[in-house]
Each structure stands twice: as C-alpha cells, then as structure tokens.
Image (spheres, coloured by chain):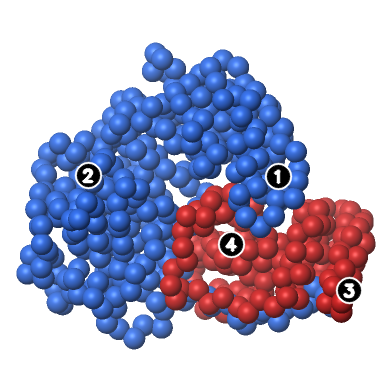
Chain colours: A blue, B red
Amino acid sequence: MPDVDVLRELSGQFQRPRFDHLEAVARQRLRRTALGAAAGVAVVALTVGMAAAGLSDGQRTQEPVHQPSPSETSTTGDGWTPERTRAEGSPVPFLGSAPSGFDTQLYCATDSASSSSPCDRYHPYNPDEDQHRAIEVTQGGESALFDIEGTPWAESFDEDSILVQDGTDDAPRFRLLQADGTAVQLRLLSEPAPAVPGPDVMLIQALELHRLASIGDDKEEPPYLVDDDAGTLQLLDVPQEIEWWGPNVDEALWGADGCRAIWQQPDGSFAHHDVDCRDGAAWDPGWNWPAFADWLEPGRMALVEWRDNGAPRVVHASMDRGATWERIVIEDRDWGDSLDVMVDALEEALRPLA
Amino acid sequence: MAGSASLHELYDASYDRLVLQLFALCGELAQAEDAVQEAFVKAIAQGRAFDRVLNPEAWLRTVAVNHQRNTWRHAKVVRRFVASVPGSQTVPELGPDHVAVVRALAQLDPDQRQVIVLRYLADLGPAEIAHELGLPEGTVKSRLARGRERLAPLLDDRKEADHA
C-alpha cells in the first residue's frame, strides 16, 4: 500500500527531546509517588516546598515593588534579574489559559548554548541549568515583573491578583501576584479545609502536569481553598475518587469518575449517580468547553460521552442536583478540523435545557 | 530507574517510527509526540521491570495509543488555548500527499485504522497484530481487508483530484 507509505517520508523530521530530560521527568514522578505513598502526594510535597521557602504559619510576604528595578527584584546569584530576562529573553506562551482580566506575559532566557531550548515544554526545570524566566503582570496601566522558577501555572484569583504556581515538584511555590508589584506567598497547610464551595476555592493543576503541558493519568486539578489574608492554601476535604472537577467550584462541588457523577448535597455529604455509559467510552464533565460556560449554575451538572474520533456523542445532564438526568444524543456529522462544530453541537444539545 | 543504554538506544531507534504511527492514528502531530514521549517516560519509570518486556516497542506503542485515547479531548482543548512554544518543536513539512493520506485514514473505522497502521507503517504481519491487540488473527485479516477496501477509493479520489 504505497499511498500510506508516503507518510514514511516524515520520518527523521521529528525533533525529539533529549533522553535525559525524559529520565528527569520519570525521576520526578517517582519521587512524587514515593511521597504520596508516605503521606499523600500533594500535601507532603507542597509542605516540603513551603518549608524550604522558610515560611512559618500564617507568615505573609508583601513585596510592594511599584517600579521594579534590578536592585529591588530577586536575582539568581549570577546577575539575572526579571528585567534582564525580559530584555534578553523571548516571550513564552502560558501553558494553559492565561489569566483573564490581566495582560500577563512570560519570558524565558538562557546564557548557555544548550542543545535544547530552555523554553521547551518537555525540558524539566533544573535550577542548576542556565535558564531564567520571568512573568510580567499588567493591569490598569500598572506593570510589575516577578521571577519564575520553571514552568508556571497561573490563573486569575480575584480582580486584582493572579495565583501563580511555579518551582519544582519538591519545592513548589504559590504566590498571589499583582500588577502593582505586590507578591503574597502562600503556605500550604497540611490539614484539609472543609468541603465548602466559595469564591476563594479554585482548581489548581498539578505541578507536574503544567510543567509537561501534558494531561496524564493523574487526577487533574483538585480544589484548593486560597486564603489571601492568612497567606495559606489548603486542599479541600473532598472525595479522592473524583477525577474531573466541574469548573464552578466557587458555586458547587461536583465532578466525575469514569461514568459516575459525584456531587455535594446540601447537607455537605456527597452523592453519586452512574450514568448510562457505553463501555470504554471516555468521560469527563463538559466544563472545559465554552459551550457549558453560560449553562452551568449551582445544581446543574453535565458529562460528555465521546466518540472514538473525539467528537461528542452523548451529553448527560442534570438540572436538579442529580435527582434526574437527561440523556441527549448528538447526531454524527462532519466535524471538520476545528472545535467550532463540536462547541456548536454541545450548545445545541443544551439548548432545550436552558 | 531505567534509562539504561538499551532503552536509550530504543528511544533513538524507534521514536520517529512510533510518532509516525501515532500521527497516522490520531492525525495530530503534537498529540502523537506527546503520547510517544509519555510512553517513554513510563518506560523509564518501570526501571528494571522494563527489561523483562518481551517486545519493548510494542509495549511503548500500546502505552502511547492508550495515552492518546485517554487524553484526546483534553489535549485538544488545551491546545485550543495554548499557543505553541516558540522554537520548541520542529514541525515536519507536511505535503499535500501526507495530509491527504492522514485524512483518508481518519475516515476509517478506528479498529480498521489501527490494523492498517500496524500493517503498513509498523510492518507487522497479521499474526503479530493479532498478538499485539489480543484479537483472533481472522479478525485482524477481516479488518485489514475492510480497511483496504474502504481506503482505496479515498486515496483514488485524492489521486484523481491531484491529476485534475
């Protein structure tokens, strides 16, 4: 079948990451697993990280740096400041959606002739290497630069600040950054917070995942309670089996594990419902689709069953806190090459339930 | 921790091959690269246990295919919001022929597409495909036959379009 053979022409054109980079990623994962076996991956790893940062309970770091200068901002000990990184580096896109409501830009620079780009998303962060990163946060005519270790994850926290996670698996760092130069470093508490939705509850992606820009087999984004006044961060005390969380954790706690929808009831306990799931179907809540943004509100949940070709097949939705579930079949069609057709199809499926 | 010379050699020898096969299966190069890199990370994490894998390349392919299936949706969504990292990826020159073949493959039933890719890009025989997929050899042969039957007019259409 020579026609298929034509693809072989592409062989040799792929740029693969260095093998030792993959080894480093594997090592870091194993370390996380070992920590998790001891006392819970996130809690231990993050606590170690905060201890390394030298913060005590309740300590809050305020760094009002309205006009950051090399002398005011941190350096890496070899003369690299965020300003120099911005001046000599190149812009790097966020891995994941950039915080909304802010103009944020990442910069990456290196002073070595490395064979691999320091901004390569598969390049595991190594503080011993000559790679330097900085983030610039701009809002309302103000702008501030902050140092970044490794590949950051960032999300809007409130109208004035973004939450940035960076560092390494062993020493992650959480900060609330503002365009006026304020940096509030957060300390992770080992005790989980009560499972209560609220405006300070947000989903935070696992450090490993955003460093790799890869969604693996791990749980994705557990909900955390962020207390900016106390300068603390706590995982919520929620069922561990929830694999995918709904996006509106500020309003309701719900998610899914395979074919099972799981949600919090008014009394605080969690209930579940197994939807009519096709064997082997892939599942997750539809939260990451723009189609669901306007539809979701407390008491509403939606799961999407996908076709083998990645297009949506069925939407399972509840509008009454899980009491009843609708099964909406999406007709097959020409899905094209973009997501627009899928988004339209999902919006169409939800329209009768609006 | 694995990372032995043999796994490194396997990485050098099979990376392109596996990416090509995954690309033919899923139609997205970045997704194919993600899946293959993920498979190697998992192989390294296997440590010495990976030395006992009888067919390492088949193991890697299976892990990569499973990863690709599990992450399809989110990879798509993530990329919708994520611009590519400058300079981090080398994008091969995809010619019209390459695009047309991938599009033709995408129109096959996934089961047929998988056996076609294993047969014509991984160079496996029906018995080897049957072993790798855990299927009866007769099922593999029938899927191959139906896949070829379905693929032929799709590729012919391309040729006719090229000549028009």
Q: Amino acid at mark 2?
A: Asp
Element type at marker 1?
A: loop
Q: Which residue is mark 4?
A: B31
Q: Chain of mark 1?
A: A
| Label 2 vs 1, first from the N-terminus | 2
Query: Do discs 4 and 3 share a chain?
Result: yes
User: Quick one: label 3, few (<14), some, or many (20+) residues within 10 Å?
Assistant: few
Residue A160 is marked as 2
Q: Amino acid at mark 4?
A: Gln
Q: Which residue is mark 1?
A: A307
Q: Amino acid at mark 3?
A: Glu
Q: Nearer the viewer, residue B116 or B10?
A: B116
Q: Chain of mark 3?
A: B
Q: Which residue is mark 3?
A: B160
Q: What separation in Å lies between label 1 and label 3 (alpha carbons)? A: 31 Å
- Quarter of the image for residue A150 reads bottom left
Q: For this view, does A321 lie left or right of residue B18?
A: left
